[in-house]
Image (cartoon, helix red, strand yellow):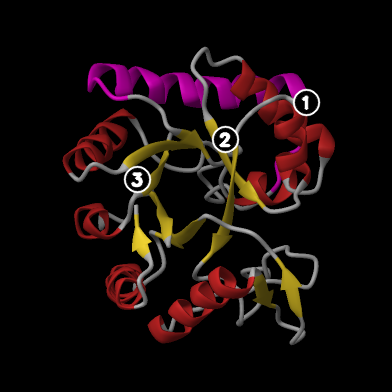
Amino acid sequence: MQIDINADVGEGVGNEVDIMPFISSCNIACGGHAGDLQSMTTVVRLAKKYKVKIGAHPSFPDKKNFGREILQMTAADLFSSLRQQIRMFQNVLHSENELLHHIKPHGALYNLVAKDEKTAKVLVEVIKSIELPIKLYAPYDSVIAKVAKFENIEVTYEAFADRNYNADLSLVSRQNKNALILKKESVFNHVKHILKTQKVMVITGEKVSIKASTFCVHGDTKNAVEILKYLHQELSNNQIYIR
């Protein structure tokens, strides 16, 4: 079995050099919630060195709240902001002779497009405005996945290795103490269970159907590197290979 492990990077933590050897794709902050031209360039070069697929990680333009609060914006303003973030990122990629592999929205935007059709359509229009075919990383059975597929955008279903789920497949809010899965063994068991059963154990104790071919470990999780090293080792021991 082969899977993709992705990480959100370029967000000011500075641990990318330790993360890159253990992932197969990355989502690089492009100025909305974090990141600037210098950080984008640095992380793109690292991804290039380790042959990691490169994705853009746009968000609401809100560095104050790290993109984790919904901003009230018109569709036109949101389109303009997201397009500007991705265009700036593409300029960096062009200068490094690299191509954009995928787009994965960040934080509050990710959660909103998963359920809100109006916002999902804005993001899809942004992706359609890019000339090259681009994949979208999105949650299984989400509004954004359905809208994107209708517009013939290739969707890669994503699950979170280090986050707990509610019964509706939304992520447990970071305000709750059980939002994050921090124990490396628990992260591995969580991923393995999803891969083997196509179900996820949610916080109510139920098992809910889910599909995923890419799994995210957040780069700003305090023990992200430890988790990724352990995942890399234990997945390989179970004949599951990161590609």
From the image, tell me which residue sits under label 1.
74
From the image, tell me which residue sits under label 3.
10
Label 1 is placed on what type of residue?
Thr
Give the mark nearest the N terminus, 1 or 2: 2
Residue 185, percent from left and from top: 41, 85
Q: CA distance from mark 3 to mark 2?
A: 15 Å
Quadrant where the N terminus is found in the figure: bottom left
Residue located 51% across and 78% down the image = 181
From the image, tell me which residue sits under label 2.
61
Residue 221, percent from left and from top: 41, 67
Question: In the image, 80: left or right of 187?
Answer: right
Question: In the image, 151: left or right of 18?
Answer: right
Question: In the image, 240: left or right of 134?
Answer: left
Region rendered in magenta? 70-98
Q: Nearer the viewer, mark 1 or mark 3?
A: 3
Mark 3 residue element: loop
Q: Does 145 lie within the magenta span? A: no
Give the mark nearest the N terminus, 3 or 2: 3
Q: CA distance from mark 1 to mark 3?
A: 27 Å
Q: Which quadrant of the structure image shows residue 125?
A: top right
